[in-house]
Image (tube, rainbow, N blue to C red):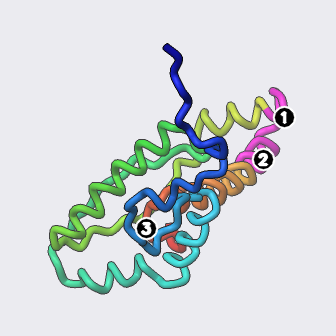
Amino acid sequence: MSEQNNAPSNASNTDYRATLNLPDTPFPMRGDLPKREPGWVKDWNEGGLYKKLRAARQGAPLFVLHDGPPYANGKLHIGHALNKVLKDMIVKSKQLAGFDAQYIPGWDCHGLPIENAIEKLHGRNLSRDDMQAKSRAFATEQINQQREDFKRLGVLGDWERP
């Protein structure tokens, strides 16, 4: 007994899309987050989303989350992301619950973490004035970078007045 192959010889040319029952949506098939996310952040900033949220809750009971700010001593890592995203969720949920829930960012720019970063970059035995000048410049640079990274994580806050 021999089996016959009933498959069409041009099976590789068959268009199977016509056999699927998929809804037609305006959403793109790909997420393309790295391409689309900067546009969202730009829209939030240009549209004044945080200011609109503040205006909507003006006069409501105040909710204050005292945030322990990050050190301005390097690029963000997963610990920063987890910390800020969780705190942002709390602030946003309180906002949705009817509170005037503000987020005013800040950074810890004093002490050993920044001095350690400067020593790694420029070596030890710097004069006090040189250490302070390099620390100030480094912290300013890190604050600017971290601010932009936190915005890209979707953290809403008064970024113009930290």
Q: Nearer the viewer, residue 95 or 23?
A: 23
SS at badge 3: loop
Identity of the residue drawn at 81% across and 34% down: 121
| Label whose residue precedes the other's in the sequence (2 or 3) | 2
Gap in angstroms between the C-alphas marked 1 and 2:
9 Å
- Residue 50 at least partly seen: yes
Kindly identify the residue that appears in the image at 58 percent across and 66 percent down.
36
* Segment colored magenta: 121-135
Q: Give how far across and how far down residue 69 sits, in percent.
A: 45, 49
Kindly indicate whether the residue at mark 2 contacts the one at mark 1 (C-beta within 8 angstroms). yes
Instruction: Give the residue type at disc 3.
Output: Gly
What is the number of the mark on residue 60? none
10 Å crowding of disc 3: few (<14), some (14-19), many (20+)? many
Closer-to-camera residue (13/46) = 13
Q: Please rate how many residues cluster around mark 2, counting C-alpha atoms within 10 Å: few if below 14, some from 14 to 19, many from 20.
A: some
Residue 4 x/y as whole percent: 54, 27
Q: Residues within 10 Å of mark 1 (few under 14, many from 20)?
A: few
The residue to which callout 1 is attached is 122
Q: Give, as a three-letter code, the residue at label 1.
A: His
Dot 2 corresponds to which residue? 134
Q: Is residue 123 magenta?
A: yes
Write down the residue under mark 3.
157
Residue drawn at point x = 58 percent, y = 48 percent:
109
Q: Residue furthest front?
A: 1
Which numbered disc flags the more N-terminal residue, 3 or 1? 1
Image position of 37 with respect to 25: above or below? above
